[in-house]
Image (cartoon, coloured by chain):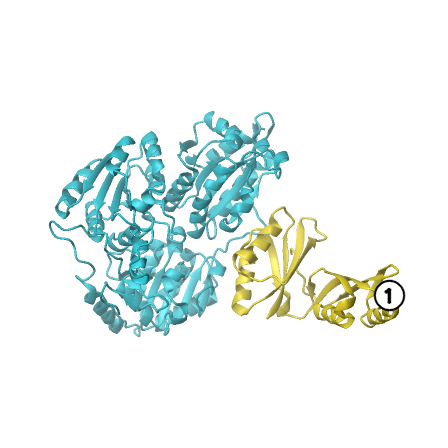
Chain colours: A yellow, B cyan
Amino acid sequence: MRHIISILMENEAGALSRVVGLFSQRNFNIESLNVAPTDDPTLSRLTVTTVGDDRIIEQITKHLNKLIDVVKLVDLTEGNHIERELMLIKVKAVGAQRDEVKRTTDIFRGQIVDVTPSVYTIQLTGDSDKLDAFIQALGNNTILEVVRTGVSGVARGEKVLSLH
Amino acid sequence: MELLSGADMIARFLADEGVEYIYGYPGGAALHIYDALFRQDAVKHVLVRHEQGATHMADGYARASGKPGVVLVTSGPGATNAVTGIATAYMDSVPMVVLCGQVMSHLIGEDAFQETDIVGVTRPIVKHSFTVRHPSEIPEVLKKAFYIASTGRPGPVVVDIPKDMTSPTERFEYVYPKKVKLRSYSPVMRGHTGQIRKAVELMRKARRPILFGGGGLVLGKAAEKFTQLAQALDFPVTTSLMGIGAYPQTDRQSLGWLGMHGSYEANMAMHSSDLVVCIGARFDDRATNNTSKFCPTAKIVHVDIDPSSIGKTVRVDVPIVGPAESVIDEMLHLLEQHKADPDHSLNDWWKQIDDWRGSRVGKLYEPAEVEATLKPQQVVEAVWEITKGQAYVVTDVGQHQMFAAQYYKFDRPNRWITSGGLGTMGFGLPAAMGVKLNYPEDEVVLFTGEGSFQMMLQELSTCQQYDIPVKIVNLNNQSLGMVRQWQDLNYKSRHAQSYMKSLPDFKKLLEAYGHVAMEVKKPEDLQPTLDKAFAIKDRVVFLDIYVDPFEHVYPMQVPQGAMRDMLLSKTERT
């Protein structure tokens, strides 16, 4: 099953390589990964999506917790949560295609953020399935380049992942 | 306010931390530190002949004392030579602090002379690592390194120190940090009471229970408590290879150690048990054999300080995360309340165990008579007798290691010093030296083989320099015995590269280093030679003992089988 593990860790040199190294060292899988500092500049928030049965996921969270740089973590998929991914996608847009791409973008509530006579660059956010669906809707022959951030997420409601 | 250079801070910190010996080898990036060490005498430096030797010396000391061993090496090759020793310590959870010189900070990343990203290289084999970014951080970084290395589940910590951090011209305030706080690291101090209660319930109801102790009991200084627990319960006791000594092996309740080459009775009892209470072992593949056939009728209680050890390889019914000593203490306390418990008869179980045990008496191996080739097992037994079971026993890796584990009986923890997890050939000599240097009054015996010994024999020179009189028992079978055994069993005796075609004349070799060497080729010479060797207290004595090259280590669990599936000799199996 797919899990989203969200990690609060020391914003220090080497911390990221320890997390990533752990996954390869222990033969765990990384589907997507993103990381950026938080409002507290000493902390980074890292989100990793991974796939595995319960035993593997338990091992992943236990080993992550053992890393000295990891302050706290949560498996967001254990509860209700919001997940988002941002995609920038560059597509061919000439002739009749221009309108078609624009319409599809509107249906998916994306935005065209850059325009040339032959190319649209579209920004789209949503969960990973929505992004996949958009790519499918456009069709392979129009897509020039796809950039995805990987999943970020947060628990619904009052629950927070913070120092205190 | 005291102002010190980074290099002086390191020397001073080590003294303040109570470090007596550090093991190392100088080189460009570490020279400021070496100069600081030269100008003080609180911390003594032992110059090894290869950095791997330094790590194993520190490791041997750490295993015997329970305190972190300290290593100092230079950048690049100095640090990479230490890698095998760091990995060895990591696999057996040995506390160690490795200080590595590094090129000047402004050169890092430029492929400078003797530059290696040692933090990167060692990342998967350390508990944690630090790079010093400013000289003023040195006391705090070192304190954190020692704290992390020696608390929780111990392990090696690497501290990477760029040369400019130790420059003698820049001075900063030095205060020894008595305490350290890490917001992301707080080792668990006690187990969950509810879980402990559940475990004790199972222990009270069990009819075929077994206690299974691991290296965590030795590292966690919980052997005494563990022994109390075993005796309070009257449970049979087995240990992992690393847990040897956690319970007195000459006691009736001890079944010896378990696993691939463990005792028949321990493996049989594990397989037939209805409750396995594991404390401080990690159920590795050499202990469990095929996990899907492991202890089919047993419930499993697993106590470990490292949550990731629990449920990693076998399913666990009652997981307890906590330090062995405090968890056992709570168990004892709970058991105390049920002291007058009548429904606790283990008579049938003990009878079964005694049958297993009895069935093997006199069948373990056939000692050689006059004019035959010595059996390695009988050499170990003779050494056990002459040292009265009281020596620190260090081993290398291979058949001799298993024979030593099987036939030397340990009644105390921290006396059995072996590379269990990584299985590092070459570990033995430097590890034995690390022990002897710190326990000069005690007998330290190294069991080794020609293969392992030749991997680190340059340290004989260090022995000479520092006068470290270890006894070296070379079980010389003129081949890589364990490899050969596997080739006999699995490759129709095709002995690919397991034969040491040109052995040195060990006697001349040892004498070249100024040591004493003796040779034993016949059974009748064994005892007189041992008597002579062990009467010498102030010299390295190397006993080159020719043993049967065709001997195999038994029992040996059948690959992919259950605990009880064992070869018992070349012709018998369970």
Percent position of residue B314, x then y: 43, 67
Please identify the quarter of the rendering in which residue B67 is found: top left
**Residue shown at 17%/41% (left/top)?**
B529
For the C terminus of chain B, the quadrant is: bottom left
Q: Amino acid at mark 1?
A: Val
Give whichever of B474, B299 is nearer the camera: B474
Is B366 placed left or right of B308 in the picture?
A: left
Q: Position of residue B393 (x, y in %)?
A: 29, 46
Q: Is residue B510 above or below residue B383?
A: above
Q: What's the residue at 51%, 51% (across, down)?
A: B124
Q: How many marks?
A: 1
Q: Position of residue B51 (x, y in %)?
A: 43, 38
Determine the chain carrying the residue at label 1.
A
Q: Which residue, as the protein is rendered here, is positioned at the far left?
A: B370
Q: Looking at the image, which residue is at 82% across and 64% down?
A: A92
Give the side of residue A76 with respect to residue B28, left or right: right
* Residue B106 seen: yes
x, y percentage for residue A65?
56, 57
Residue A93, above or below B416: below
Q: Nearer the viewer, residue B501 or B552?
A: B501
Q: Which residue is mark 1?
A: A94
The image quadrant where one finds the N terminus of chain B is: top right
Q: Is residue A65 visible?
A: no
Instruction: Quadrant for residue A151, please give it.
Output: bottom right
Q: Place residue B468 in its image quadrant.
A: top left
Kind of element beneath mark 1: loop
**For the residue carrying disc 1, how many other residues have a C-alpha within 10 Å: few (<14), some (14-19), or many (20+)?**
some
Residue at the image point whose x is 40% and y is 39% from the top: B53
